[in-house]
Image (spheres, grey):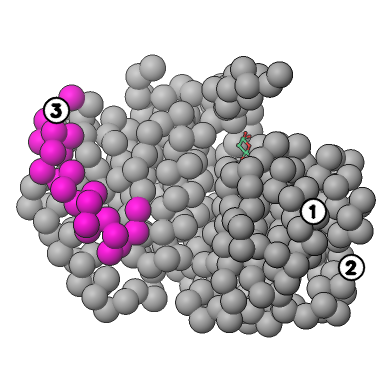
């Protein structure tokens, strides 16, 4: 597989590029925010209000669904009056009990880890809420337990349904008074996503298209993606996952300050100094810094110094700033750029972004 930037030419993309429509799916993010906001508001979640605030919220999900828990936590932010924990495995932590709310999220409604956690939540008498495909095993668990179920019917890959899966959680958090999110916050998020989709559309050329130019910067490098706040770190994680699944590509992610205690040392390592898999600057490591407006002052200093240290050593750096005021808006702008960049990266390599055959094979090989 070779990187051919010509594959990102408008005409190529229109003829044989993007065979499974991942670009179209990314472009539909704004519509997904609007539709899922409306659906979540219309869904009967009154039992949540009746039962009041839980002690904690545990979101269970894997991959593109599990990140809904991180998004919820980031949007509620530092001031959240209760802990919001994401569980990406088969079991609930021992401390989870009847006063906690477990939200099981699975686009297909069939992911075995998520189903196992949902059933454990029922056994422990937790307040359960589930989101996913209608007529799925997850809905059956919710129905049997008399728990509310929010149907998600986007079709396609779970990672392409990220907003359909996470917006209802933000609506619920707003109902529980965990975050201020009025209609305006959702609409301004949708508008930002529309704006990015316009800038990143296939017809827009690389030098004015941030999705294409980011893909060009990533190609033939090992991208190291750092977030400058907990919110930006969720976006960094999403970028890495999207590079993995869309691009079939490796990526390293982390959050400042933690990365200053480990990953920064890679600036002096073999990939930073040797030309084994290199971009035009002769370096295979490349740093992407996702910046948030809400940075701890010490984190801002660490970011500036980290960038300078990378550049002093010839490691190329790209910085991307979140746009908007509301945390949902800021997170969405960072996520959307990564969604486009990873899709264009795949297309530039002649790879179909949509299928994830290694995951399918793995599931088949572990099935009894
Ligand atoms: O959202 P569900 O259907 O539970 O899938 C969760 C994850 O499952 C994996 O096997 C892949 O398909 C991922 O792309 C997906 O994000």
Query: What is the magenta range?
Result: 254-276
Up-down relation of residue 201 to residue 55 (above or below) = above
Q: Is mark 2 within 8 Å of ligand 1?
A: no
Quarter in which the C terminus is drawn: top right
Gap in angstroms between the C-alphas marked 2 and 1 = 24 Å
Viewer-nearest residue: 352 or 158: 158
Up-down relation of residue 191 to residue 80 (above or below) = above
Task: Please tell me whether mark 3 sits on a helix, a strand or a loop.
Answer: loop
Q: Is residue 240 visible?
A: yes
Residue 302 position, x and y percent, is 20, 67
Q: Which SS type dominates the magenta stretch? A: helix
Kindly identify which residue carries mark 3. Answer: 275
Q: Which mark is residue 44?
A: 2
Q: Which mark is residue 123?
A: 1
Quarter in which the N terminus is drawn: top left
Q: Residues within 10 Å of mark 1 (few under 14, many from 20)?
A: few
């Amino acid at each position: 597989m070779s990187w051919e930037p010509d594959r990102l030419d408008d005409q190529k993309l229109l003829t044989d590029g993007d065979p499974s429509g991942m670009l179209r799916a990314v472009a539909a993010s704004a519509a997904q925010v609007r539709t899922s906001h409306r659906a979540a508001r219309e869904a009967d979640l009154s039992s949540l209000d009746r039962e009041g605030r839980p002690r904690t919220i545990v979101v269970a999900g894997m991959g593109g669904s599990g990140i809904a828990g991180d998004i919820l936590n980031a949007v509620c932010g530092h001031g959240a009056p209760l802990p919001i924990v994401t569980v990406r495995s088969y079991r609930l932590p021992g401390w989870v009990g009847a006063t906690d709310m477990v939200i099981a999220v699975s686009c297909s409604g069939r992911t075995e880890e998520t189903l196992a956690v949902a059933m454990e939540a029922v056994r422990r008498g937790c307040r359960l809420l589930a989101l996913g495909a209608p007529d799925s095993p997850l809905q059956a668990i919710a129905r049997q337990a008399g728990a509310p179920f929010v149907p998600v019917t986007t079709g396609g890959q779970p990672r392409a349904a990220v907003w359909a899966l996470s917006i209802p959680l933000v609506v619920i958090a707003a109902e529980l008074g965990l975050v201020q999110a009025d209609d305006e916050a959702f609409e301004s998020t949708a508008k930002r996503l529309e704006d990015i989709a316009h800038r990143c559309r296939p017809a827009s050329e690389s030098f004015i298209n941030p999705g294409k130019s980011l893909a060009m910067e990533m190609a033939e490098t090992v991208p190291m993606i750092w977030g400058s706040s907990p919110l930006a770190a969720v976006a960094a994680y999403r970028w890495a996952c999207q590079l993995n699944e869309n691009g079939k590509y490796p990526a390293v992610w982390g959050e400042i300050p933690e990365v200053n205690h480990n990953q920064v040392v890679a600036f002096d390592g073999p990939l930073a100094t040797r030309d084994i898999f290199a971009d035009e600057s002769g370096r295979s490591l490349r740093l992407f810094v996702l910046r948030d407006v809400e940075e701890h002052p010490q984190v801002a200093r660490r970011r500036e110094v980290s960038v300078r240290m990378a550049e002093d050593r010839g490691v190329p750096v790209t910085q991307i700033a979140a746009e908007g005021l509301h945390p949902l808006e800021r997170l969405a702008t960072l996520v959307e750029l990564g969604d486009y960049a990873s899709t264009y990266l795949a297309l530039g390599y002649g790879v179909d972004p949509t299928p994830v055959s290694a995951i399918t094979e793995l599931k088949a090989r572990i099935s009894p």
